[in-house]
Image: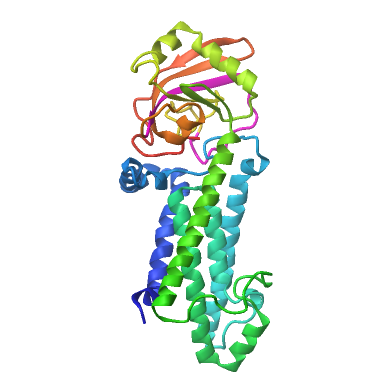
Amino acid sequence: MTPISEFLKSKKAVGALFLFYLIIGFEFFYMASPFAVYFYSVYGPGLNFLNNNPAFFWLSGLFRPHIVAETTSTLLNLRNVIGGILSLGGFLGFCIAAAQVYYKKVTRKEAVTGGLYKWIRHPQYVSLLVCGLGMLLLWPRYLVLLSFTAMIFVYYFLAKFEERECEQKYGKSYLDYKLKTYSFLPFPLPWSPKQSLLPKSGFRRVLGVLTLYILITAAALSLAVGLKTWSLFSLYGVYTEEAANISLTKIDPETLNEIIKIALSHPFVKSRIDVGQDIGKRKFINYILPSPWYVSEIPMNPVPGVSGGPHPHSRNFDRNKLRIVFTRAELRGKGENQGLEILRKAVRTEPILEVLVDASQKKVTGFLEPPIRRKYAGIPVPLF
């Protein structure tokens, strides 16, 4: 038996993998909690290592919107609702299936074939994968995606290993049960082969498993890259040679251009924007949001009485009272990056100034200096 086969059949290895995935996936929940600062004191150095490494920087990036509340896509706007339902539903399914298994173990009865197991043979693994998919939607770093594809891969082989164990332990009763059910879905897939396409043993099997894993991972990454491109084009934003101006809410491009123009026409704002970098080389990511909102990942001042939370923003706000957070973007690599490329290539941002704008009166109503202390200073956070 090869070392890879031993790993695939090791419950301890699978448990370690799942724990690793939970640590990554639950970053979303920690960011929304009072323990975020303590969590990132440990987690942050790893993210910074990836973000600053030319070979691995993409792992710390996100492939769908997180900061923005509204996009031109209804599906993207429902991303957190869908992710929350999948996470909760998967967790509940796992608890129910686990309770069935442990009840049978305590009572020392035959293999579990009722309840959820009446429909599929591995409801626990399916539930964990559904929960993992939900977390991936809530906090879609490429690093989480790679962990999710590894979970799919390992759980499949562990399920097959457990089926062989059950056949040896329960004999004909389990074989009859297998004839009536499917492994992971309550119905067969139309393209599923009648027998495994992988060699049964030896080096050829190891090579086949490795090739399959690479293909699955490559397909997942390709989908993620496509989703990121779609997400970027779904933002409410206007772009210039030196700036990406992103609105967190629905604002048409003409109005958004007018809001930016109002802010930049003020002498004080113009003087602050022009300081610190050569014209032609400077790049900016500027965030436009309702003035009562606070988003902790944006380098802005806290709003009294408002949590940075998982961004449960009030929908009852005056769309004419806006806040523009001007930030200077540090880009990766060289080249003439413009517009959306600024978002793609940005490593981090540094705050310049917050400007309060009344769109109905077409004037600047106030300024705020950048915060002295930032909640996630020095930590790679979502940029859109």
Residue 167 located left or right of residue 296? right
* Residue 266, x across and y down, in percent: 49, 8
Q: Where is residue 146 in the image (x, y as percent from the top left)?
A: 45, 56
Q: Nearer the viewer, residue 29 or 65?
A: 65
Q: Residue furthest bottom?
A: 172
Q: Can residue 158 be seen in this view?
A: yes
Q: Position of residue 122 (x, y in %)?
A: 57, 74
The span picked out in magenta is: 307-332
Query: In the figure, 208 relative to 335: above or below?
Result: below
Numbered disc total: 0
Q: Which of 152 and 104 is in front in this view?
A: 152
- The residue at the point 54 percent across, 38 percent down is 311
Give yes or no for residue 344 being in the magenta stretch.
no
Q: In this view, does 18 lie to the left or right of 90?
A: left
Residue lying at 36% horizontally and 47% vertically, measured from the top left: 56
Quarter of the view holding residue 248 = top right
Where in the figure is residue 2, as x and y percent of width and height? 35, 78
